Image (cartoon, rainbow, N blue to C red):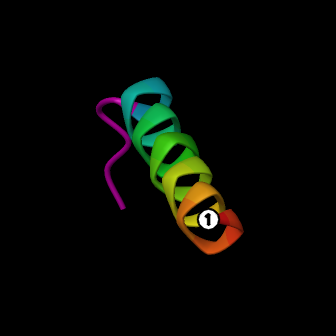
Amino acid sequence: MELHAPSHEADLARLRRLAVSMDSAF
């Protein structure tokens, strides 16, 4: 596996998870 932008991918995953949690909350 290549980790060219771990921080960027981590941010995307965090934002996606946050969006999913907000969608489920509403």
Q: Residue furthest bottom?
A: 24
**In front here: 23 or 2?**
23
Q: Is-magenta flag for residue 4? A: yes
Q: Amino acid at mark 1?
A: Phe
In the image, is residue 2 above or below residue 1?
above
Q: Is residue 16 left or right of residue 17?
A: left
**In front here: 2 or 22?**
22
**In front here: 17 or 9?**
17
Q: Residue 19: x percent and y percent?
A: 50, 53
Q: Is residue 22 left or right of residue 1?
A: right
In the image, is residue 19 above or below residue 4?
below
Q: Residue 5: x percent and y percent?
A: 34, 29
Residue at point 53% right, 65% down?
23
Q: Residue 8: x percent and y percent?
A: 38, 28
Mark 1 Cα shell of 10 Å, populated few (<14), some (14-19), many (≥20)? few
In this figure, which residue is indicated by the disc labeled 1?
A: 26
Residue at point 49% right, 26% down?
7
Residue at point 61% right, 65% down?
26
Residue at point 40% right, 41% down?
12
- Residue range in magenta is 1-5
Q: Residue 9: x percent and y percent?
A: 40, 41
Where's the N terminus, which quadrant?
A: bottom left
